[in-house]
Image (cartoon, rainbow, N blue to C red):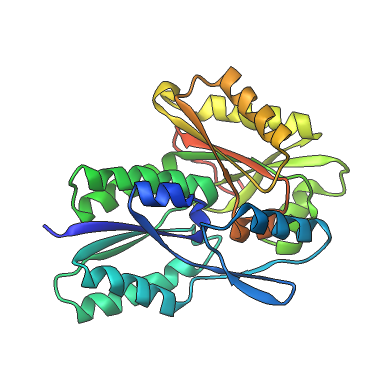
Amino acid sequence: MRKVKILTDSCSDLTGELLEKYDIDYAKMRYTYNGVEREAKLTWSEDEIHELYNAMRDGVRVTTAQVPAEEYTELFTKYINEGYDIVYLACSSKQSSSVNTSYVVAEKLMAENEGVNIICIDSLNSCVPLGALVLETAKLVQDGKSAQEIAEAAKAMRKKVNQFCTVHSLKTLHQAGRVKGAAAFFGNLLGVKPILISDADGVQTPIKKVKGRQNSFEEIVNLLKEAIENPEEQTVYLAHSDCSKEEVEQLKEMVKAAVPCKDIYVSYIGPIIGGSIGPDAVALAAFGKEVTYRVGE
C-alpha cells in the first residue's frame, strides 16, 4: 500500500507548528491589497497579521484569488514523485472555486501516473472548521489507513464540524458579497452582530442576529455548547481576525465555563476568510451534531 499525504489549502488556517506536527502541506491561495498580490501563507508573522487587519480598519479593500492550476500541479507532482497517494481537503466550493481546479489537475496527473491515487474533497467548510477536519484526517494516516479509507472517513466527518462565527462590522461582509441573503437579513439595524455558520452545503450564511459584542460572544458559546458532542474528548478551536488579547482571553474563559472540553486551540483567521469577514471577527468550532441547516430553510 502506498503511503498517504494529506494536503489542504490556505483557508484551513492551521499554524506552521500543526502543519509540521501532523506532516500536512497546503496549496496557497492569493490575496491583494494596496496594489500588491501576496501568497496566503499559513506561516505568516504577527506583524503581517496586524498590518493586514489594520489596513482593513483604515478602509483598504482586500481581494482574494483561488489556488492557481500551476500551484496544484507543482504540489501534487512533488508528492507523486515521493511515492505518495494524496488526499486533498479543500475549502468549501461555495466559498472558493479552488476545489474545481484541483479535480481537473488531479485527473490529468493520475492519467499520466499509473497507479497513483489523488482524491480531492470539498470539505464544505473553511477557516478553523476546515483545519479541524484536516487534523482529524491526518491522524488516520498515522493509523495506517489507505487513501480511499481516509477519504471516506473525511467525507463522513465533514458535516459534523460545527462552526459559529460573529463579526465586528457588517461593512466587509457587504463588500465581499459572499454571505447569502445578508442585505435582507440584516436590513439597516445599527449595532447588529450576525451569527454565521457553514450550512450543510458549505454556504457561509447568517442564522441569527444579536445586538452588541458581548451578546454575540455569549450566543456563539451557547450555540457551541448545544452542538458539541463528547466535549471531554475534544479540542475547541477558536480563531480570530486580530482581536485584542483581552477579548480572546475573555472568550476562552467563557468557553471553559460553558463547555468541559479537553483543550482550546487559538489561532488567527487568515487573509482569505479575513478578507471576507473583516477585522475583529471571532469563530468557534468543534465536532458535534450533524449540520443539517440549509439557506432558505
Residue under the image location 33 percent in, 52 percent down? 23
User: Residue 132's image quarter?
Assistant: top left
Q: Residue 243, relative to residue 210: is it above or below?
A: below
Seen from the viewer's position, the closer of residues 168 and 97 is 168
Q: Is residue 254 left or right of residue 192?
A: left
Q: How many marks?
A: 0
Tell me residue 31's x, y (percent): 62, 69
Q: Is residue 84 left or right of residue 285?
A: left
Q: Is residue 102 left or right of residue 46?
A: left
Q: Is residue 180 visible?
A: no
Q: Is residue 262 visible?
A: yes
Tell me residue 198's x, y (percent): 55, 47
The N terminus - image quarter: bottom left
Which residue appears farthest toward the left when viewing the image? Answer: 1
Residue under the image location 83 percent in, 62 percent down? 59
Residue under the image location 17 percent in, 46 percent down? 144
Tell me residue 202's x, y (percent): 51, 52
Residue under the image location 38 percent in, 59 percent down? 25
Seen from the viewer's position, the closer of residues 195 and 182 is 195
The C terminus - image quarter: top right
Tell me residue 217's x, y (percent): 70, 31
Seen from the viewer's position, the closer of residues 248 and 114 is 248
User: Residue 133's image quarter?
Assistant: top left
